[in-house]
Image (spheres, helix red, strand yellow):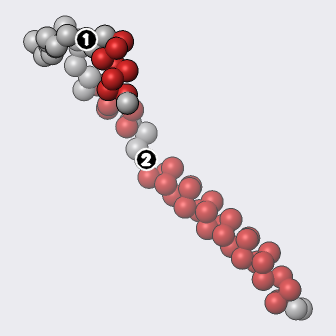
């Protein structure tokens, strides 16, 4: 057998196998209750005081915007 001719195919097969193994391991490591736990801690919008930001600045006119763009 001439292994030197088939080194590219051997490398691609090894890289594919390694990638599939890494993906399988990463998927198996994620707990199944991850999304359920995230929604269980959600705070309803009506709970407590909501912070409000008030902007008191005046809007720029079209002429002022054009002057800033230059």
Residue 4: image x %, image y %?
Answer: 82, 90
Identity of the residue drawn at 22% across and 19% down: 43
59 and 6: which one is in front? Answer: 59
Between 63 and 41, the one lying in front of the other is 63
Query: Which residue is at 31% across, 10% downward?
Result: 61
x%, y% of residue 39?
Answer: 33, 25
Asked whether, in this view, residue 70 is left or right of residue 14, the answer is: left
Q: Residues within 10 Å of mark 1 (few under 14, many from 20)?
A: few
Q: Residue furthest right?
A: 1
| Quadrant position of residue 54 | top left
Task: Please determine whether, in this image, residue 50 is positioned above or below residue 30.
Answer: above
In the shown orientation, is residue 6 left or right of residue 26? Answer: right
Residue 51 as seen in the image, left or right of residue 45: left
Q: Secondary structure at mark 2?
A: loop
> Is residue 20 shown above or below 49?
below
Q: Find the distance from the CA under tag 1 to the CA under tag 2.
A: 48 Å
Residue for badge 2: 30
Q: Quadrant of the N terminus?
A: bottom right
Quick one: quadrant of the C terminus? top left
Compare residues 3 and 33 and report the one nearer the observer.
Answer: 3
**Disc 1 on helix, strand or loop?**
loop
Identify residue for label 1: 59
Query: Label 2 near label 1: C-beta < 8 Å?
Result: no
């Amino acid at each position: 057998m001439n292994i030197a001719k088939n080194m590219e195919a051997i490398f691609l097969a090894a890289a594919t196998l390694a990638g599939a193994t890494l993906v399988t391991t990463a998927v198996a490591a994620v707990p199944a209750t991850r999304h359920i736990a995230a929604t269980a801690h959600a705070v309803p919008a009506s709970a407590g005081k909501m912070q409000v930001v008030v902007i008191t600045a005046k809007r720029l006119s079209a002429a002022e915007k054009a002057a800033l763009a230059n």
